Image (tube, rainbow, N blue to C red):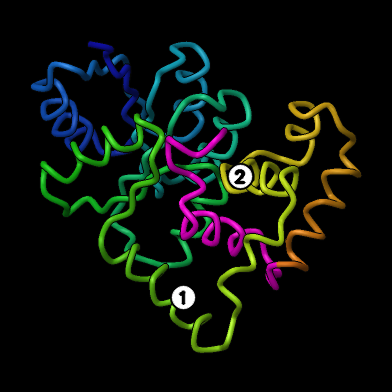
Amino acid sequence: MQVIRTLIVDDHAIVRMGVKMLLGKQGNIEVVGEAADGQEAVEKALSLKPDLVIMDLSMPPGKNGLEATRELKQSLPETQVLILTMHDDEDYLFQVLQAGASGYILKNALDSELLTAVNAVWEGQAYLHPSAAKSLVEDFLKRVNCGEDLSTYKLLSNREEEILVFIAKGYSNKEIAEILYISVKTVETHKSRIMDKLGLQKRHELVAYAMKKGMLSLDHPL
């Protein structure tokens, strides 16, 4: 059984202690470190190279969880990030998904839900707490009611689909270009065509679209 090496990031020691105690009871999870702010989180992640980071969003006065997630994913793209926060806000949801996080769960969730989220994110799936999922469903229904063609995904070429997945997972244009051995300008061109074909205008809309299409699940080819 493979152990999930986990880093816990929260500015409240009592929260870190509670999460650590919960995870410590699980046979497949090992807490390898803790951090109290975003900067420390990035530094420890680079040193420890955990499989999973459980990240708070608000950690004043230094670097917040959103910034830390974005920086961490740029350096350690294989490390999964699960956001654990008190903010039940759709704007935060789209921002953390854009930054590269794979999950979003509230601090008032049940212990069992946190464990479910940890294992889901570790397995390469996207995990959202119910109200966040509801926001995406409402957005989906809004698009249906506005007459959006739900078959638009079929209009994407294989390369466009590939780039869309990388964008949704938080990779920068430069990183995508390096991975696919193409120029940054080519990535930008593909991104523009994807947005035109899907009728989208912002990056977080691409993330939400990819999630709705199941493109961020483990069995998707990337």
Residue at (40, 77) in percent of width and height: 138
* Occupied quadrant, residue 158: top right
Magenta part of the protein: which range?
198-222
Residue 58 coordinates in the image, percent (x, y) = 40, 49
Mark 2, residue position? 165
- What type is the residue that disc 2 sits on? Val
Mark 1, residue position? 139
Residue 209 coordinates in the image, percent (x, y) = 55, 61
Q: Residues within 10 Å of mark 2 (few under 14, many from 20)?
A: many
Q: Are marks 2 and 1 in contact (CB under 8 Å)?
A: no
Image quarter where the N terminus lies is: top left
Residue at (53, 56) in percent of width and height: 95
- What type is the residue that disc 1 sits on? Asp
Query: Residue 58 magenta-drawn?
Result: no
Q: How many marks?
A: 2
Check disc 1 and report its element: helix, strand or loop. Answer: helix
Query: Residue 220 magenta-drawn?
Result: yes
In this view, 49 is above or below 136:
above
Residue 110 coordinates in the image, percent (x, y) = 11, 49
Residue at (56, 23) in percent of width and height: 76
Residue 213 coordinates in the image, percent (x, y) = 49, 57
Residue at (82, 44) in percent of width and height: 187
Could you say which disc has been placed on residue 48 in the image?
Answer: none
Give the Cα distance between marks 2 and 1.
Answer: 19 Å
